[in-house]
């Protein structure tokens, strides 16, 4: 993909995000459950810290979880699976750019708009909650690579499931089951460190935590240098694993793909 093609795809993605900004805002509101969890855990921490989190700690954690959820979102699973089922993939296969690159740029280009729309809500919650723990600039910089890898995990996982539509009529149902596990095991509803110790160790090695809980802990300064490096390594492992799976499913699926006019 040349820089010119990439820039054109980026502009298309931004234009699409602007055109569907109302739908995007509704989607943002649908992902604000961490802010509901904030109210619950902040109330429970009135009498003292829970698992190392006081009230300010919970505010910082859940506002960070809400914002990072916006910056690592993707929706290729629903769009690509629909294109495969309805035969809309035919036209995309005839384009000079690879369909996966089109979806990647379309999803990625919408993230700045999504973040800008979510930022006032996150700031408003911080103000109403009386503020959280201060975030160091060093932690912000350390979070950037974790965000890129987390987005890669989410996108490639969705791409893998979407490619199952070459064989299944309802591939998105599988991803909805994945999302149910994600809500519980990623740190979305509560910090994974609050689970029983042995269970928490298993959870923290899974892709759910790598896609959300780990970047949140990096941003809120709750990771030692060794834990940070280990977490980055796990993220890289999951990116490679889902990348290989997505590549295999795509290649075999396209060979099998058949629709009127294909």
Image (cartoon, helix red, strand yellow):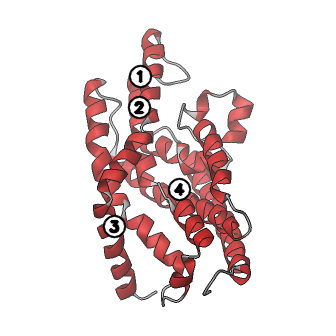
Depicted 216 relative to depicted 234: above or below: above
Q: Is residue 89 left or right of residue 130?
A: right
Q: Is residue 24 shown to the viewer in this render?
A: yes
Decide: few, some or many residues near mark 4? Use Cα within 10 Å; few <14, some 14-19, many ≥20. Answer: many
Q: Is residue 234 left or right of residue 93?
A: right
Quadrant of the image containing the C terminus? bottom right
2 or 3: tag closer to the N-terminus: 3
Q: Which residue is mark 2?
A: 35
Decide: few, some or many residues near mark 2? Use Cα within 10 Å; few <14, some 14-19, many ≥20. Answer: many
4 or 1: tag closer to the N-terminus: 1
Q: Residue at x 39, y 29 (%)?
A: 59
Decide: few, some or many residues near mark 3? Use Cα within 10 Å; few <14, some 14-19, many ≥20. Answer: some
Q: Residue at x 36, y 52 (%)?
A: 24
Residue at mark 1 to residue at mark 2: CA–CA distance: 7 Å
Residue at mark 3 to residue at mark 4: CA–CA distance: 23 Å
Q: Is residue 254 left or right of residue 153?
A: right
Observer-side mark, 3 or 4, equals: 3
Residue at mark 2 to residue at mark 3: CA–CA distance: 28 Å
- Residue 147 in percent (x, y) is at 46, 56
Decide: few, some or many residues near mark 1? Use Cα within 10 Å; few <14, some 14-19, many ≥20. Answer: some
Q: Which residue is mark 4?
A: 150
Q: Are marks 4 and 1 in contact (CB under 8 Å)?
A: no
| Disc 2 secondary structure class | helix
- Residue 92 in percent (x, y) is at 51, 82
Q: Which residue is mark 1?
A: 39
Q: Which residue is mark 3?
A: 16
| Disc 4 secondary structure class | helix
**Quarter where residue 233 is shown:** bottom right
Observer-side mark, 2 or 3, equals: 3
**Quarter where residue 122 is shown:** top left
| Disc 3 secondary structure class | helix
Q: Residue furthest front?
A: 260
């Amino acid at each position: 993909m040349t820089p010119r093609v990439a820039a054109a795809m980026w502009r298309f993605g931004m234009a699409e995000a602007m055109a569907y900004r109302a739908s995007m805002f509704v989607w943002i509101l649908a992902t604000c459950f961490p802010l509901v969890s904030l109210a619950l855990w902040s109330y429970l921490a009135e009498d003292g810290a829970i698992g190392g989190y006081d009230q300010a700690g919970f505010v910082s954690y859940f506002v960070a979880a809400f914002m990072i959820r916006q910056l690592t979102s993707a929706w290729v699973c629903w769009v690509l699976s629909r294109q495969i089922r309805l035969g809309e993939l035919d036209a995309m296969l005839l384009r000079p750019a690879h369909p996966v690159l089109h979806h990647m740029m379309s999803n990625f280009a919408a993230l700045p708009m999504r973040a800008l729309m979510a930022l006032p809500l996150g700031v408003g919650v911080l103000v109403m909650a009386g503020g959280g723990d201060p975030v160091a600039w060093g932690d912000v910089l350390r979070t950037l690579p974790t965000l890129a890898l987390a987005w890669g995990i989410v996108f490639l996982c969705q791409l893998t499931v979407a490619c199952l539509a070459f064989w299944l009529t309802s591939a998105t149902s599988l991803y909805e089951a994945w999302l149910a596990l994600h809500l519980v095991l990623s740190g979305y509803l509560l910090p994974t460190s609050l689970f029983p110790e042995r269970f928490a160790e298993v959870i923290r090695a899974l892709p759910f935590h790598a896609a959300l809980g780990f970047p949140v802990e990096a941003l809120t300064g709750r990771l030692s240098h060794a834990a940070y490096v280990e977490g980055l390594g796990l993220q890289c492992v999951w990116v490679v694993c889902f990348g290989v799976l997505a590549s295999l499913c795509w290649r075999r699926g396209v060979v099998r793909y058949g629709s009127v006019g294909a």
